[in-house]
Image (cartoon, helix red, strand yellow):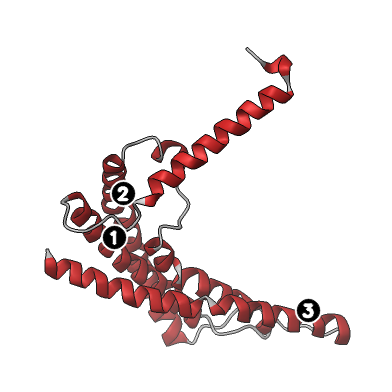
Amino acid sequence: MNGLLALSRGIDRVTTVIGRSVAWLILLAIFVSAINAVVRKVFSMSSNAWLELQWYLYGGAFMLAAAWTLLENEHIRIDIIYGRWSRRAQHWIDVLGTVLFLLPFTAIMIWLVHPSLMRSWRAGEISMNAGGLIIWPAKAVLLAGFILLFVQGISELIKKIAVMRGLIEDPHANTEGSLKEAELMTAGMHDERIDQNPESRP
C-alpha cells in the first residue's frame, strides 16, 4: 500500500502543477475576448479565428483543470443526500462512484477521442468556419483532460481505501462539518420564512 500511496502523491503533485498552470488560460481567454470585442466595435472587423481561440482557451482550462478540481473535492455533488450519511458511508459512496462511473466513463472517452484525434491530425482538419483554426489541438486537449481525470480518479481511489483502512488522515475530513453547517443554515432560513409568514405555520 505504501507504493500505491507514493504513486498517489506523485499524481497529486502533477495534477496540482497542471491545474494551477492552466487556470491562467481563463485570464488569457478574457484578454482575447476583450481585444476581439474592441476590434469588432471600433473597426467593424471580426475573425472566426479569434472567436475559436477563446473557445480553445476556455475549453483547455476546463478540461485540463478538471483533475485538479477532483483533487480539491470541488466538483458539484448532490449534498442533500450525500451529507446525511456518516463519513464512512460517504467514503463507500465515493469508492463505488469512482469504480462504477468515473473510471469507466473516462476510459470510454479516452477510447473514443483518441482515434478521432489521430484522424484529425493526419488529415490536417480545419474548422468549417471561414478563417477558423485547426481542429486537432482542441481534440488533443480533450484527450489530455480525460487522461488526467482518469489518472486522478486512480489517485482518489487509492486515498479513499487508505483512509478507510486507517493508514492516512482523511484529506477532506472537514467536508462533513461543512455539509452539516449548510444544512443548519438551510433549516434556519426555513424557520425565518415561517416567522415572517405566520400564516404558513402548520
**Picture disc at residue 156:** 1
| Location of residue 105 with respect to 30 vertically, above or below | above
Label 1 close to label 2 by CB (< 8 Å): yes
The residue to which callout 3 is attached is 37
Quadrant containing the C terminus is: top right
Secondary structure beneath disc 3?
helix
Q: Position of residue 177 (x, y in %)?
A: 41, 44
Tell me which residue sits at (59%, 79%) in the image.
127
Q: Give how far apart the Cα atoms at labels 3 and 2 are.
A: 43 Å
The quadrant holding residue 1 is bottom left
Q: Give how far apart the Cα atoms at labels 1 and 3 are.
A: 42 Å
The quadrant holding residue 29 is bottom right
Give 26 or 33, whichever is nearer the viewer.
26
| Location of residue 156 with respect to 131 vertically, above or below | above
Q: Position of residue 159 (x, y in %)?
A: 24, 59
Give the residue type at disc 1. Answer: Glu
Give the residue type at disc 2. Answer: Asp
The residue to which callout 2 is attached is 94
Q: How many marks?
A: 3
Label 3 close to label 2 by CB (< 8 Å): no
Secondary structure beneath disc 2?
helix
Q: On the rendered structure, is 21 left or right of 42?
A: left
Secondary structure beneath disc 1?
helix
Give 90 or 154, whichever is nearer the viewer.
90
| Location of residue 122 with respect to 14 vertically, above or below | below
Which is more N-terminal, label 2 or label 3? 3
